[in-house]
Image (spheres, helix red, strand yellow):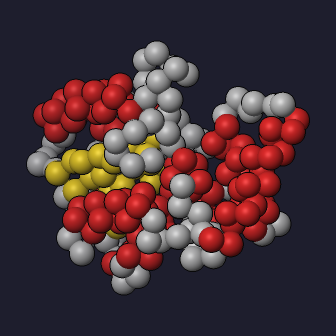
Amino acid sequence: MNEDIEILIIVEGTSDKAFMEKIVEKISPSQSQKNILITTALNRRSNKEAVLSCNNLLTIINEPKHGSVKKILLLCDADYAKRNAKYSGFKKTKNTLDLLLPDLKEECSREIEIKYYIFPDNHNDGNLETLFLKSISKDLKQSLICVENYFECLKVIPKDKTKAHTLITAIGGNEDIFTVEYAATDKFFNFNSLLITKLTTFLKNFLDI
């Protein structure tokens, strides 16, 4: 990767990071190896609050290795409004980011373009796993039906239904697939799906592809 990083993509956790690396490589194989760095908000599995923290983001932006960054993209899940009164749901997440960006730009030591995208589609409640379940390939659709029947038969409602469905559906397609980031291939995703197309169109515009 080129040392002069011009585009910084900040995500919640390692699953998001690996997923976005594959998506960027898919839409622009040459550019993905050049001036783009995809990093997690904190060195842990997932932390939405870290993406929504001005102080934390400034710490990342002001790292010496990010001194040449000109554009930043923040990525996080909308989640579901009923789960967290402060951060969850698309509307609350969007409002938080809309308030955050002006403060972040003002505190930056240099002029940087900053945008955001909220999973699953920059419009509705959900998460990265929601995007996966609505964009699975034709080969995995039968696996998803089996998973839905499985939960219905057991009369079990998982705490996080989308994550549970994603995990078991992906494993149904390949026993080595355990999380959504490893499923970002033609075998598991329909890259012509509405949600994937919306994401890649946004990325192409942001990356000037």
Q: Residue sitting at 77 percent across and 50 percent down?
A: 147
Residue 175 on image: x %, y %: 82, 66
Identify whether 100 is placed above or below 172. above
Location of residue 169 by image quarter: bottom right
Residue 204 visible to an observer of this rendering: yes
Identify whether 61 is placed above or below 190. above
Which residue sits furthest bottom? 30
**Is residue 18 toward the left or the right of residue 70 in the image?**
right
**Is residue 100 toward the left or the right of residue 41 in the image?**
left
Residue 143 on image: x %, y %: 75, 61
Say which quadrant the C terminus sits in.
bottom left
Tell how many labels.
Answer: 0
Residue 26 on image: x %, y %: 44, 76
Taking depth in this image into account, of 168 and 109 the one nearest to the observer is 168
Taking depth in this image into account, of 176 and 11 the one nearest to the observer is 176
Identify whether 203 is placed above or below 34. above
Which residue sits furthest top? 85
Residue 5 visible to an observer of this rendering: no
Q: Residue sitting at 40 percent across and 82 percent down?
A: 29
**Is residue 27 toward the left or the right of residue 163 in the image?**
left
Say which quadrant the N terminus sits in.
bottom left
Q: Residue sitting at 80 percent across and 40 percent down?
A: 151
Taking depth in this image into account, of 106 and 161 the one nearest to the observer is 161
Location of residue 179 by image quarter: bottom right
Residue 27 on image: x %, y %: 38, 76
Q: Residue sitting at 23 percent across and 32 percent down?
A: 98
